[in-house]
Amino acid sequence: MTLRTMGIYRAFLAEMPRIRIVPPSVLVEDGLAIRRGEREIRVRFLSRGNTAGDLVVHLPAVGVVATGDLLVHPIPFSFGSYLGEWIETLDRVKALGATVMMPGHGELQRDTRYLSSVQELLGAVRAQMRDAVAKGTDAGAGARGAGPGGLPRTFRRRRPGTQPAVH
């Protein structure tokens, strides 16, 4: 852990006593439609992916969807996520037909190429874990043994003068 990272953690811990948790006043099970003037805003639960409560905000009239952490650019992250459902949830995001996707972090996406690459990555990870479990390897050991084989090129970084590498 770097000194900078330790400083960030210390600052966070110092702020924690002042954090006030405010429960939601509206719960979304499947979806919620909001009208703002002539504009329709749809808040949708398409299924689990990065978390159990991933919501997307869709503005169908202008072809925009905010994906939250279902889609993060340039590198997706996953901690306690739902890899078994995430790919299909991203299919549902695609089915919305948006021409602009606003990820939870990173650059706007103006087509579905990056989303498809994330699906390919998730599929590769899922396949590696299935293979490890089929061989009798426990999940922890399977995760530690997972390697770059089969990962999409999108997630391979090229260092000057070297072959592409996954980091």
Image: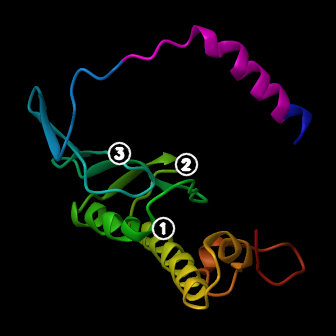
- Whole-percent x, y for residue 124 in the image: 54, 81
Q: Main secondary structure of the magenta part?
A: helix
Q: Which type of secondary structure does the marked residue at label 3 adopt?
A: loop
Q: Residues within 10 Å of mark 3 (few under 14, many from 20)?
A: few
Nearer to us of marks 3 and 2 is 3
As measured in the structure, the alpha-carbon distance from the residue carrying label 3 to the one carrying label 1 is 22 Å
First-in-chain label (2 vs 1): 2
Nearer to us of marks 3 and 1 is 3
Q: Is residue 70 above or below residue 90?
A: above
- The residue carrying mark 2 is 106
Determine contact: label 3, label 1, CB under 8 Å: no
As measured in the structure, the alpha-carbon distance from the residue carrying label 3 to the one carrying label 2 is 20 Å
First-in-chain label (3 vs 1): 3
Q: Which type of secondary structure does the marked residue at label 2 adopt?
A: loop
For the residue pair 15 and 76, the one nearer the viewer reads as 15
Quarter of the C terminus within the rendering: bottom right
Amino acid found under the numbered disc labelled 3: Gly
Residue at 25%, 55% (x, y): give it.
Answer: 46
Q: Residues within 10 Å of mark 1 (few under 14, many from 20)?
A: some
Left or right: 71 as drawn, with respect to 79: left
For the residue pair 131 and 29, the one nearer the viewer reads as 131
Left or right: 3 as drawn, with respect to 33: right
Residue at 29%, 57% (x, y): give it.
Answer: 47
Q: Which residues are magenta?
A: 5-22
As measured in the structure, the alpha-carbon distance from the residue carrying label 2 to the one carrying label 1 is 12 Å
- The residue carrying mark 1 is 114
Quarter of the N terminus within the rendering: top right
Here the colouring is: rainbow
Q: Is residue 136 above or below residue 84?
A: below
- Whole-percent x, y for residue 158 in the image: 78, 74
Amino acid found under the numbered disc labelled 1: Tyr
- Residue 53's label in the rendered image is 3
